Image: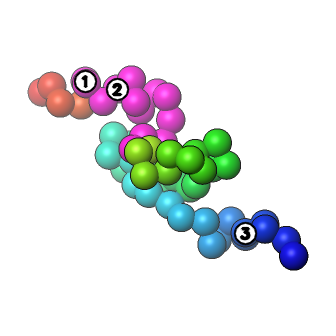
Amino acid sequence: MSRHRPKSDRPSKLCPICDRPFSWRKKWADCWDEVKYCSERCRRRRNNADRP
């Protein structure tokens, strides 16, 4: 039996920096609960978003 899930069935989250949805990726399988940002760019911008 196949373990493949259609893209529509994969979990997703909203990035707090850019407010865009992003989907689960295989490389995040072990740490999906800790993933907060959609990209490295948004992760770097997190400190700038706190400043006015």
**x and y, in percent, of residue 16 in the image:** 32, 46
- By secondary structure, the bulk of the magenta-drawn segment is best described as helix
The residue most toward the bottom is: 1
Q: Which residues are magenta?
A: 36-48
Amino acid under label 1?
A: Asn
**x and y, in percent, of residue 2 in the image:** 85, 71
Whether pointer 1 and pointer 2 mark residues with C-beta atoms closer than 8 Å, the reply is yes
Q: Residues within 10 Å of mark 2 (few under 14, many from 20)?
A: few
* Mark closest to the chain's N terminus, 3 or 1: 3
Residue position marked by numbered label 1 in the rendering: 48
Q: Nearer the viewer, mark 3 or mark 2?
A: 3
- Could you tell whether 29 is left or right of 45 in the image? right
Q: Residues within 10 Å of mark 1 (few under 14, many from 20)?
A: few
Task: Please tell me which residue is depicted at 43% across the width and 52% down the height of the picture.
Answer: 33
Q: Residues within 10 Å of mark 3 (few under 14, many from 20)?
A: few
Which one is in front, 4 or 8? 4
Task: Please tell me which residue is depicted at 41% across the width and 32% down the height of the picture.
Answer: 42
Amino acid under label 3?
A: Arg
Q: Secondary structure at mark 3?
A: loop
Residue 8 location, quadrant: bottom right
Task: Please tell me which residue is depicted at 72% across the width and 69% down the height of the picture.
Answer: 5
Residue position marked by numbered label 3 in the rendering: 5
Q: Is residue 42 magenta?
A: yes
Q: CA distance from mark 1 to mark 2?
A: 5 Å
Residue position marked by numbered label 2 in the rendering: 45
Q: CA distance from mark 3 to mark 2?
A: 32 Å
Which corner quadrant holds the C terminus? top left
Q: CA distance from mark 3 to mark 1?
A: 36 Å
- Could you tell whether 30 is left or right of 7 in the image? left
